[in-house]
Every structure is written in structure tokens, then in C-alpha cells.
Amino acid sequence: MLWFVFTTPVCNLNCRYCGGTIPEEVMPHEIRYTVEELRDFLKKDPERDIAFYGGEPLLKTEFIEKVMEEIPARHYFLQTNGILLHLLRPSILKRMDTILISLDGDERLTDLHRGRGVYRSALKNAELIRKKASRGI
Ligand code: SF4
């Protein structure tokens, strides 16, 4: 089964059609369980896949890395706006099966909805992680 792990409802962007960070009263901003508790819960599913989601999930990079170190899964996925992708360590990047980077189209359209410079930043980081994952730097 595919399990979505919301690492945070906080986002570092405020896209026009989304509104950005989900308010604290709707979803807690801090994770209220431990990785060990999550591991015990997910043990029930030996065929688990894990997708990291947000908000912007990479605002909790340490949590993502700890989950991947402590909880084996068939596949790991990440859905991100790409701005913080440079924070992931090569050893973790190599174990990600799929990284989905959200863009709205070309540079003009993406920056119109997401903010100035977002398109270039996301693409720059996409190129960077490709190099990091292949070279292990
Ligand atoms: S990056 Fe995603 S979560 Fe963040 S504001 Fe934009 S659409 Fe919403």
C-alpha cells in the first residue's frame, strides 16, 4: 500500500491557487509522533511504499532522512516544489525512487503563480540532485 507521510503542512511558497501553509488549527505544524511509532504502525504492511508530502515536505528534511533510515519500504516518493532539494544528502537521494517537482508550465507561468525565480530555482536543484545522486558527492 502507498502511505502518504505529511511531514509538515507548512510551505515556503504561497502559490496563487493554493494559499500556502495550512493553518495550525486545521493541521498541527509539528509532527506529534515519533519515527519509532510510525515504524511500529507501518509494520502491519509488509508491502509498504512511502510518499513524503506537505506543505513542503523538505522543510522537515531530517525527519524524512530518519524515516528512510528507520523504516524499510519497497519504494520512496517525494512531492516537492524543488526549492529545498539541495538539502537532501546523496545517500538519501539515491534511495528515492521518484521525486516529483511541481511546476505550472514554462518559466513565465510558473513564476506568475509560484513567485519570481521559482522556476529557475527548481530546475537548478533538479540538475544538482541528478549530479549528486550519480556522483555520490
Ligand atoms: S508549493 Fe504546493 S503546497 Fe506550497 S503553496 Fe505552492 S501549491 Fe501550495
Image: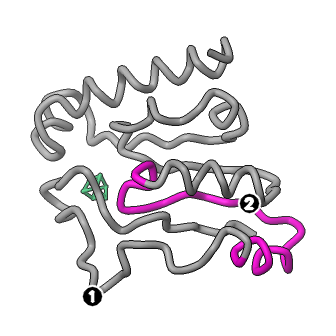
Kind of residue sitting beneath label 2? Asp
Residue at the (30%, 86%) spot, across then down: 26
- Is 132 positioned to the left or the right of 46 in the image? left
Horizontal and vertical percent for residue 16? 12, 56
Residue at the (40%, 25%) spot, across then down: 125
Q: Is residue 13 above or below residue 106?
A: below
Task: Give ligand 1's quarter of the image.
Answer: bottom left
Q: Is 54 covered by the magenta stretch?
A: yes
Question: Start and end of the magenta stretch?
Answer: 37-59
Residue that extends furthest to the bottom in the rendered view of this protein: 25
Kind of element beneath mark 1: loop
Residue at the (22%, 50%) spot, across then down: 13
Mark closest to the chain's N terminus, 2 or 1: 1
Q: Quadrant of residue 137?
A: top right
Display colour scheme:
one colour
Which residue is under mark 1?
25
Q: Nearer the viewer, mark 2 or mark 1?
A: 1
- Is 121 positioned to the left or the right of 96 in the image? left
Q: Quadrant of residue 130?
A: top right
Closest to the observer: 117 or 16? 117
Residue at the (18%, 53%) spot, across then down: 15
Q: Quadrant of residue 56?
A: bottom left
Kind of residue sitting beneath label 1? Glu
Mark 2–mark 1 distance (CA, rounded to whole Å): 29 Å
Which residue is under mark 2?
49
Horizontal and vertical percent for residue 57? 45, 55
